[in-house]
Image (tube, rainbow, N blue to C red):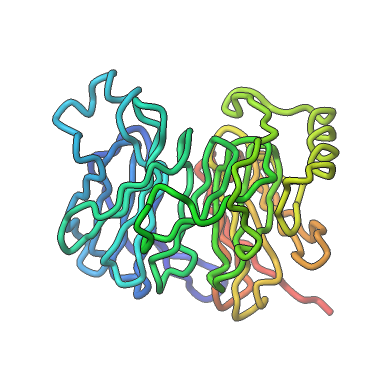
Amino acid sequence: MFDYLDENKVRLNKTITCHNVSWTISDSDFTHDDRFMIHSTLSPNIQLFDVENKKYLHQLCVDPDAGDDQDDEDYWYGGMRVYSAKISADGKEVIAGTSKVTGGYAKIQVFDVPHNTIVRSIKAHSDDVNSVCFVDKLNSSLIISGSDDGLCKLWDTRTTNANNAVGIFYGHMSGMTNVCSKEDNRYFISNCKDQSLKLWDIRKASTDQKKVNFIPYDYRIESLDPFMQGRIRERMKDNRNDNSVKTFFGHQVRETLIRCHFSPRITTDQRYVYSGSADSSVYIYDIHTGQNVAKLQVEGGRLIRDCAWHPFSQNIVTGDFAGNICRWEFVDND
């Protein structure tokens, strides 16, 4: 963790040595007051960390059937792995998007932290749930999920039939890598392996089961050539089932679960959305015009998986696969 200093400098504040990491830290999140953090790995375990006192508090296991064989090859391919995890504002609830398990579905697990138990287990998607988020972090009952089955879904944990989504969002043509809520109870965005970022209106969700116009490919080792990307754009235009508000193209979604976000409310009124990219860049799009208004590229860098816009100042921090942490600052020379 780094602190901002004057004269465009940053200082290392603290280093957290993470426990029980299976290959990678797949996600992390903070409570509203930044006192507690969670991080997940490609295992059924989520770690709860006390940031102020610099110590681990608890390990949350979201798979009630997980035993001591989590390192076995059979469990790795058929057991539950956490790809995404978010903690509620008050720290009392954690949601986890998990891998497809033996049996043909992937779950969203809702974990009650104070009682150390799973309170909801939702059979959410037919393939890995790569990303989950709260519609509003202060009200944890509504959840958005994005999956490798090509769908985003809206869930209400207050309903009696938890396995039925209250809304389905059609329009993407490949697997999701990230979903992010605007936290206004209306809009969210999604990043997808079809090389697009989409803006959605929750009120326009569908409740019908429809066919997904899906393009299967392994984005970890393959890439879509310009011809195929052009075909995707044309097919999206002709897709009558697409209920997204707007689609943004330009950034490259390859190799890993690249994240996207809304710009801050205080400094930009959330006018922009932005995303990391496989070409060592951050792309910033104007929601109103749909145009790419800025591209921040790290010279000599590698894929940027995630980036963060400062909530109160015109600064963006990026981390890339070459190990660079870069800070960008907007300077108005007019």
Residue plotted at (43% across, 60% down): 156
Which residue is nearer to you in this view: 228 or 124? Answer: 124
Which residue is nearer to you in this view: 50 or 332? Answer: 50
From this view, report whether residue 102 is shown above or below residue 60: above
Residue 232 % position (x, y): 79, 35
Splitting the image into 4 quarters, where does residue 38 fall? bottom left
> Is 19 placed left or right of 96 in the picture?
left
Residue plotted at (48% across, 42% down): 130
Residue plotted at (15% across, 32% down): 67
From this view, report whether residue 334 is shown above or below residue 287: below
Residue plotted at (37% across, 52% down): 162
Residue 203 % position (x, y): 62, 65
Residue 148 % position (x, y): 54, 36
Extreme residue in the top direction? 73
Quarter of the image with the N terminus in it: bottom left
Which residue is nearer to you in this view: 54 or 268? Answer: 268
Quarter of the image with the C terminus in it: bottom right
